[in-house]
Image (cartoon, grey):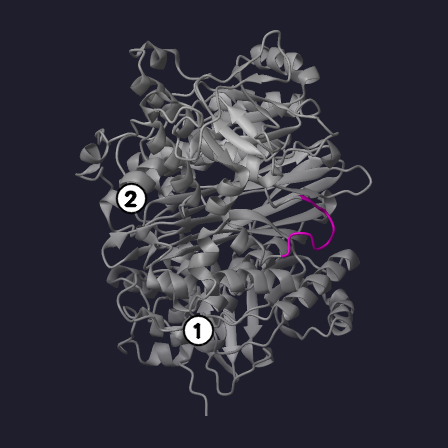
Amino acid sequence: MIHNDTVAQAQENPDLDQPYAELGLKDDEYARIKDILGRRPTDAELAMYSVMWSEHCSYKSSKAHLSYFGKTTTDEMKSRMLAGIGENAGVIDIGGGHAVTFKVESHNHPSYVEPYQGAATGVGGIVRDIMAMGARPVAVMDQLRFGPADAPDTQRVLPGVVAGVGGYGNSLGLPNIGGETVFDASYAGNPLVNALCVGTLRTEDLKLAFASGEGNRVILFGSRTGLDGIGGVSVLASDTFEEGAERKLPAVQVGDPFAEKVLIECCLDLYRAGVVVGIQDLGGAGLSCATSELASAGDGGMHINLDNVHLRAENMTAAEILSSESQERMCAVVTPDNVDAFMEICAKWDVLASDIGCVTDGDHLVIEHQGEVVVDAPPRTMAEEGPVYQRPYSKPDNQDALNEDPHLARPTTSQELRQLVLDMAASPALCSREFITEQYDRYVRGNTVSAKDADAGVLRIDEESGRGIAVATDASGRYTQLDPRTGAQLALAEAYRNVAVTGATPVAVSNCLNFGSPEDPGVMWQFREAVHGLADGCAELGTPVTGGNVSFYNQTGSTPILPTPVIAVLGTIDDCATRIPQKLPAGQEGQEYHLILAGAETKDEFGGSIWQQVAHNTLAGVPPQVDLKLEQRLGQFLAENRESIAAAHDLSEGGLAQAVVEMAVQANRGIAVNPSLLTDKSLGEQTESASSDVERAFIGMFSETASRVLLAVTKENYEDVMASLADHDLAGAWVGLTGITDQAGTPQVRFGTSIFPALPFSEQVALGEARSEDGTAASTGGSAADLTELVYSVTELKEAWTATLPALFSHAAGNNSVIE
């Protein structure tokens, strides 16, 4: 026998003790609920308010700061936005009747508890957000952060998360076109699993989440409602992890990608038939969220009968039905004359559908179960009028000390410099992610233009015209820890640049802001600074934030993660055939390319760099500075010159050296580079000596100065490209040449401060004598103290770059193994 706490009982027994604190409500929040209702809440109402007022759903700690996005978004920036912040996902008009919707969200805490299902349902949830906009999902991306790569628990979490992302996305038939994987000790007990989905639609097919029209029916369709996910993300997202948290398995949802695949096609058929007035996906907070948000956004009230909900567990109470986060479910508002057509389409796809209620002319959400009213409340008080906290914020006491120059030892010999290239390439921070990405299908659906070996994923959305989009994500918790405002802008700049190096024009931004506890004033200072930095940066670039997500309480005990604002940038390109690849083209036999370092001059900027992390296990100093106007000019230059550029690769973590390693290994082509040819003029004022040559080479190779790209151009296009750089007020310099081999024809990579183009300009390069692998002169055996040329075989670099993750994870523990 099911026992429900009814509205009548709440009126008759007003002083009943209720477990509101266990559900995450504060004393004053519980008191406010009683004031709203004029009585104590029923169990079902208490469950609904607790999840809808949770940090995950209400944004109660972040809303005061997120409003800054609206203040900085101009009418011009809004001109192409069809839907923005507050909707399930942002939608941008990209011309020709086409629109694109995209969003990135988190599923962090569930993915620590149960890595496979946590990650899988994270993908499923963001896909349904895209479906709810009236779009067909066309691609996914994942942004992952784990503890140290060699930590025992990372052996448990990473394989499960990667399998979950791949298992769900691959089964849906959605290409995974890019993402990030980062390792840092701060994520050891709190991994970040952020997922992005992109969808396409015709502009006239846009759907929004609202319930209007008295008498319109409310239909729940998709999978049955069960006990899985009771308390799921909505409660877990207000949790921090202590020892033993792994045992919270029942709270994590269970996904069925094949049910979601059918649901996608069913929704698209419903949209084509024109039988949907409004629609909402069921994710965090389940039916509580769907009904209250639909009713709140409409022009009336709503009456729901839970007896009509298809269940997969017996004896579920009203509170359980409303709180369940069972996956693969949607809720639609349908006019009465279209209900039969709606049901026929669902039956065609073998999708369960239930008429669970209707839109009313009142202003309350009324829910009944087994003939008794269990909820009677104003929906706006749940969905839109939750508490808003002005959390105290203050700069952490240790911030100034953190920003002091740590004066770390730098390489002083060419042998040290040579080994550093290998150590950096092989580090978990920079090594190849192929071990992960090869578990994802990137070409399904046949419209993927670039994914592997690409700074951004490029996708064709119109086969006739070749029109396409490019998407990239970025975040640096290290930079953001040192300076939250600059760190957010650096993430924005790199994601923007990653899109731009494909030749696409950035047009929109989404974000997922991952931070520690909002009850920590230092964390709230980081959050506020990052939000303001991102909003101001987007205003400067003229690129609007269309939506996003906030994930708080990412910490283990009282230790927060590095502040991690993940920024996604979407760009458009009128013809994907003219994109700029990252990989050097094969070209005609004997065709080699000149390399141009373009954008900003290289400065001595190592605060928060990967060199600090790899060589010294340190995080200190100030991050690189960023000039967003220069970034914008660089993007314009790349878009205008995409048919003259054979390949392009952005410079970011690891600097020029890492970009050269990746370019050489991916194309199996030799490269010679002089790293000192586009450095800040002040760096050349050092004393001329062997040690200063090494110092200049080190700065040129590993500095992480922003707003730089490495271009490969033919001899015929070199002059025009250089002239265009000058026209855009951008720095640019010849720095090297491809096609370098040893006498046996084996591809080599050489770094040297004596490498210059031969005069008159030709495809030859003036190289010093060959050096052996230990850095000494091959012919003389002389001391390396006065040598600045570093020589590697491409095979040696490939082994260093690609071997790390397979060695660590090929025999990793099972998804749910207990690691002692």
Judging by the rendered image, the residue that carries numbered circle 1 is 230
Q: Could you tell me if residue 7 is visible in this image?
A: yes
Q: Find residue 324 and report its horizontal and vertical position in percent.
A: 48, 72
* Outermost residue, bottom side: 1
Q: Find residue 352 and report its horizontal and vertical position in percent.
A: 67, 75
Q: Which residues are magenta?
A: 441-449
Q: Is residue 741 above or below residue 551?
A: above
- Residue type, numbered disc 1: Ile
Magenta run includes residue 359? no
Q: Find residue 793 and report its horizontal and vertical position in percent.
A: 52, 37
SS at mark 2 in the image: helix
Q: Could you tell me if residue 234 is visible in this image?
A: no
- Residue type, numbered disc 2: Met
Does residue 354 appear to the left or right of 734 in the view shown?
Answer: right
Judging by the rendered image, the residue that carries numbered circle 2 is 524
* Along the viewing direction, whichever of 627 and 388 lies nearer the viewer: 627
User: Looking at the image, is mark 1 or mark 2 earlier in the sequence?
Assistant: 1
Q: Which image quadrant is residue 654 in?
A: top left
Rendered residue at 31%/31% (across/down): 607
Q: Find residue 712 and report its horizontal and vertical position in percent.
A: 61, 25
Rendered residue at 48%/57% (across/down): 806
